Amino acid sequence: MTTAQDVLATNQAFYQAFERLDIDALSLVWSKAPKVTCIHPGRSALRGWEQIRFSWDQIFRNTKQLEVAADVIATEVIGNVAYVVLVENLVQVVPERRMEVQTMVTNIFEYEDGNWFLVHRHTSPMMQAA
């Protein structure tokens, strides 16, 4: 099959599309299977590519600039499924506001037709010490 490096390359492609606010490039990384899910911080689970694409499109339309530094904690490949656990350090500029956020993320990939595709993404905000 493939290695963890292949999964990390797909994960990196996701983050490049995310940072460029490029919905077309992002759509190349996501599986189009009905089972795909995405959980944005503090939001309900989205199911299916159409819902997920709509949510990313809304995020991108309302964002002027985005910088993401993703620190990988763990990567595991188990047959045709793989996961990447990481911390995102995100700087997002939306109209009249700059936000800095740190989140804990799990990206799950499935090997389909010779490529790794994102099938589940769960992002949770990390608590900041006072």
Image: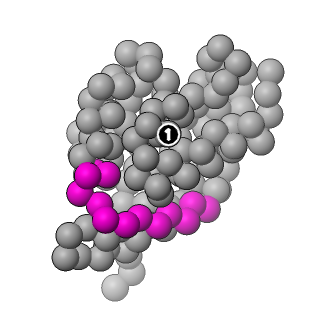
Vertical arrangement, residue 71 with respect to residue 80, above or below: below
Which corner quadrant of the image does residue 6 belong to? Answer: top right
Q: What residue would you read off at disc 1?
A: 25
* Quarter that holds the N terminus: top right
Question: Which of the 4 quarters of the picture holds residue 111?
Answer: top right
SS for callout 1: helix
Q: Which of the pair 35/78 is nearer the observer?
A: 35
Q: Residue at x 44, y 37 (%)?
A: 24
Query: Residue 63, position in %: x, y?
Result: 29, 61
Q: Nearer the viewer, residue 29 or 43?
A: 29
* Callout 1 crowding tier (Cα within 10 Å): few <14, some 14–19, many ≥20: some
Give the side of residue 33 with respect to residue 114, left or right. left
Image height of 121 relative to 66, above or below: above
Residue for point 34% across, 85% down: 130
Give the residues drawn in magenta, as a range: 59-71
Amino acid residing under circle 1:
Ala
Residue 112 point in image, percent of width and height: 62, 17
Give the quadrant of residue 129. bottom left
Q: Nearer the viewer, residue 31 or 122?
A: 31
Image position of 7 (left or right of 39) = right
Outermost residue to the bottom: 130
The outermost residue toward the left is: 96
For residue 88, above or below residue 77: below
Q: Is residue 62 highlighted in magenta?
A: yes
| Residue 101 visible here | no
